[in-house]
Image (cartoon, rainbow, N blue to C red):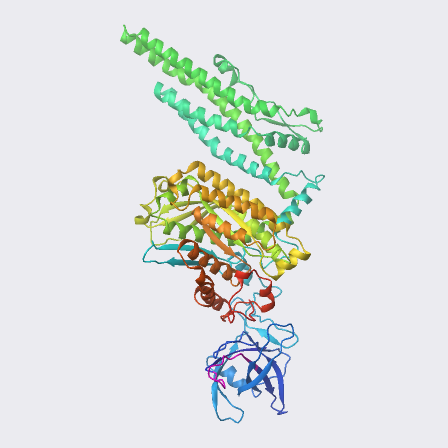
Amino acid sequence: EISVEFSCKGLVAATRDRKLNTFIQVSVVHPAEHILTRYSSTEIVEGTRDPLFLTGVTFPPEYPIYEETKIKLTVYDVKDKSQGTVSILLHFFFLGCTTFRVGDLVKSKEQQLTLTLRTSDGGKTVGTIEVNLVKMGEFEDGEMGHITTDAQDQKCALVRECTTPEGLSGEKTLEFIPINLHLQRMHVHSPRLKDALYDVITVGAPAAHFQGFKNGGLRKLLSKFEAERRNTGYQCIYYSPENTAKAKEVLSNINHLQPLISSHADLLLNSASQHSPDSLKNSLKMLSEKTELFVHAFKDQLVRSALLALYTARPGCVIKKPAVPRNSAEEGDDLKHQDHPSQIKRQDSIPHHSEYDEEEWDRVWANVGKSLNCVIAMVDRLLEKDSSKIKEGENDPSAADCKVLHAGGDWYEQLYPLVITLKDCMGEVVTRAKQSMAFVLLQELACGLPQCLMLTLRRDIVFSQALAGLVCGFIIKLHTSLHDQGFLQQLHTVGLLVQYEGLLSTYSEEAGMLEDMAVGISDLQKVMFKVIEAKSEDFLPIITGRREHYVIEVQLPAKMFELLPQEIKEGKLLRMYPVLFNVGINEQQTLAERFGDTTLQENINQENLELLKEYYNLFTEKMPPDCLPHFQEQNDLKGLLENLHQNIQAKRRKNVEIMWLAATICRKLNGVRFTCCKSAKDRTSMSVTLEQCSILRDEHQLHKDFFIRALDCMRREGCRIENVLKNVKCRKYAFNMIQLMAFPKYYRPPEGTYGKADT
């Protein structure tokens, strides 16, 4: 298989001032037949004398082509191209042609030929044409490069696709990487006003693009999975995601608090053996605090109900009723002689459900509190006796010393059995809680392990893409705001608002993308940031934690780190508040609005409006009124939020005002902005340039008469068109005239900047 791409330079037009619209016709001359056969042609590239053609030519393996085969390339100029009607009329005019041998191209050092284009009589030179052989061999990992081919006319789009031949998995790993992630910064300089920076991160929709959207995206798949789990109750017990999250929280509390309580109990005994009243008081205080936290952690209906479910499912395992601590500390000695409360006995016959008392769980953890009360009462009694003995011995110091020495041994002996009982009661709670919470988590797995694993993988893929963008946004925001004390206070007091603008339609596969994106962005709530001082020249962020809770450690050089508030320097975890607002703007959204369903978009926007309001309320509650610059008053924000609410409720078609309002609110709340479409190349470019011009108009006195000119200039030159070139090797947005008719007015690029381009 051979594939070739073309580009021309310095084409000469018959009239100097006329722009050229050109395409190349490819013909084959077979060695034996000497017959010229038309094979295919490129797309038309408009308005340039140096066209780069995205559509080349591919000869499949079965096509009879050899080293001696000659390829003829003829360049035509297209005039009077009518774009206003459905039937497009084309008038072709010959510019020049050239011929080359296939063998010369294949054997050339760079697998590239630069040929001179001449008029039909072989005389006048009308420019040059560059012919490149697209390498179709194996990649290092054994994966074959692939170029998509149109079966009708054998045109090939010169953009590689990641394909997975049978038995190979090499480029699939790229599905965890965000698509076309870029930071775009607008620096506004004015001699009269203060300079300003406006950052926006553009990235392709965080979604499982490789897995596809045949069955929808995560939002639908997770909902369906939960419904199926509910309906399989005869096989396993359904616990909601909230319950499984609670189970993980309980287990985490156990692992954190049990060792602490045990160590504080040992310190209490140590203080008793040393006969130190002050140390005894402090040790008791710490033990009491941690034990109360421990008891509180298990006051949850889930633990009680899960225990009943566990013993119903496995009735052969019955736990003896635990020892009950006496209320009087004087009887503490008797407690150590009772059976260990966590002893388990097996019985052959299956007991009735009534043999497990559901209220027993309340008694189990209540015993921990009773045991602690016994310890507290004993310490109070010991200290009271100690103080009275000291008073008795004031007149006879030598007698007092003897009594104190004698009482020292009693403290340890009298506290020891009570502390052991406390540990035993705590061990009983831990045993039962761990059993019941493990049971809850195992039910989740039992209700559809294969499907659960596939959904977990998909969720991980989407989350990974979203997380990469978030880390980028956080670091950039931190670096640019090190001297903004108001923002730094907001960062550790309230948290960071992270706003995503989506431009996906709710039709076909993009609806699935939007579902993936919504879940991935919501999952960013589980991420917290911590700023640390870098100890080396390696400033890469460090990620720790698991799916339910990630901590990203961002490293700063010492000089930057010193600028931070004390709370952040001490390692306070910084919360993220991600929100997503989506408005589809392309022709697919027109289909969704007329023949499909826009409920997904409406629900997402409504849900995230509530999240945005929560952040705003938190902001106004915790931050002082003068924390925002003078032109960003609280009333201004309140009015914008109300306006956003009304626009979301209005349910108007392609209501892009939703995105303008959300973006403005985000900037006024010192948030980080993301703009996303499928590839972050075309629709994203239209939105970002519109946002930048709007900022210039609203904040920097750009005159309204120059608004459209500035907008067209930004789309024709600079950052966005460079991004397009970087992606598809052509300065053309991938729109056509018919598509753009469906776009909102201000999202249409200027003439000459769009055309056929494979994304």
Q: Residue furthest front?
A: 705
| Residue 576 versus residue 754 in the image, above or below | above
- The answer to whether any part of residue 164 appears in the image is no
What type of secondary structure mainly makes up the magenta span? loop
* Pick the front one: 386 or 632: 632
Give residue 336's position: percent from left, percent from top.
51, 19
Front-most of residues 556 and 730: 730
Q: Is residue 54 left or right of residue 276?
A: right
Which of the image's four quarters has the N terminus? bottom right
Q: Quadrant of the C terminus?
A: bottom right
Residue 625 as seen in the image, left or right of residue 743: left
Whether the magenta-drawn stretch holds residue 638 is answered as no
- Residue at the image position 30 percent from the left and 11 percent from the top: 401
Is residue 198 visible from the viewing direction of this image? yes
At which x and y percent is residue 688? 48, 59
Residue at x-position 58% and y-position 70%: 146
Count of residue discs: 0
Q: Is residue 590 above or below residue 263?
A: below
Q: 409 and 526: which one is in front?
A: 526
Residue sitting at 64 percent across and 40 percent down? 443
Q: Position of residue 700 (x, y in %)?
A: 39, 55
| Residue at figure coordinates x 53%, y 94% from the top left | 121
Above or below, 330 against 730 in this view is: above
Residue interval drawn in magenta: 11-24
